[in-house]
Amino acid sequence: MAYGGTGRTSGTGREWSGADRVKAAAGLMAGWIALLWILEAVDLATGHALDPYGISPREAAELRDLVPAAFLHFGFGHVAANTVPLLVFGFLAALGGIRRFLAVAALIVVVDGLGVWLVAPAYSNTAGASGLIFGLFGYLLVRGFVDRVPLDIGVGVAIGVIWGSTILLGISPTRSDVSWQGHLFGLAAGVLAAFVFRRRPRRGDAAALIR
C-alpha cells in the first residue's frame, strides 16, 4: 500500500487511488470465490471426478496436484466454510497490490502443499482452500510488523483478536477429518511470505517521510 505523499502506479503509469485498489482486490477475490464454487459444481455434476486431484502423500505423481488441490473441495459445505475467511483475508491482502498478493498466494499454496505431501497420514486425500486461508492469516498477522506500516499492524492485530482462537483450534491435531497439517504448514508459509515479499522503501517513499 502507499501512504504519505507517494502512490503506487498501474502498468500504464497512472497512480492507483484507494478506490482502484479496493475495486481490484474485490474483483479478484469475487472471481476467486466464484471459481471455487464452479469447480465444486463441476465435481458434483461429474460424479466427483475432480476429487482425485487432491494430495495423496508421498507419491511422486501427486506433486502435480499441489496447486489444483487448493481450489478443490469435498462438498458445498466445505466450500461454504472456506468462503468467508478466504474472501476477507484475500481482500485485505490484495489491497497491498495484486501482483504481490498473487506471489504470496503462490508461495503459500506450494509450501503448504509440499508440507501436506510430506507429512499427511498415509492413504489420505487432502484438498481445500483452508491452507491458503491459514497462510493469509499468518501473512496479515505479521506483514505490518515486517513492513513497519502502522495501518497493516492494526489490521493484523484485529484479525488476530477476531480469528485467533479459530486458527489455534485449526492447527490442533484433535480431529481426524481435518487436515491440521495443511493448516499448520499454511500458517507457517504465510509468515514466511511476509518476509520473502516484504516491502522495501523506495527513494521516493523515504523522501516523503522526511519532508
Image (spheres, helix red, strand yellow):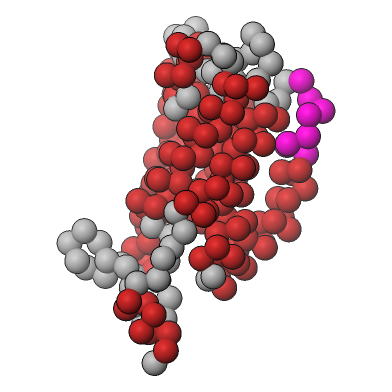
The answer to whether residue 76 is left or right of residue 176 is: left
The answer to whether residue 207 of the structure is visible from this angle is: yes
The answer to whether residue 13 is left or right of residue 194 is: left
Is 90 contained in the magenta span? no
Query: Residue at (67%, 63%) from the top-left corner?
Result: 157
Residue 166 x, y percent position in the rendering: 74, 44
Residue 181 x, y percent position in the rendering: 67, 29
Is 172 contained in the magenta span? yes
Query: Residue at (38%, 61%) from the top-left corner?
Result: 21
The answer to whether residue 44 of the structure is visible from this angle is: no
The answer to whether residue 44 is left or right of residue 77 is: left
Residue 126 x, y percent position in the rendering: 59, 20
Q: Which residues are magenta?
A: 169-176
Q: Nearer the viewer, residue 71 or 121?
A: 121
Q: Nearer the viewer, residue 90 or 42?
A: 90
Above-or-below relation of 197 to 107:
below
Above-or-below relation of 149 to 189:
below
Q: Main secondary structure of the magenta part?
A: loop
Residue 189 placement: quadrant: top right
Query: Residue at (47%, 51%) from the top-left corner?
Result: 196
Residue 121 x, y percent position in the rendering: 69, 16
Q: Nearer the viewer, residue 184 or 94?
A: 184
Query: Residue at (57%, 73%) from the top-left corner?
Result: 150
Residue 203 placement: quadrant: bottom left
Above-or-below relation of 61 to 129:
above
Residue 197 placement: quadrant: bottom left
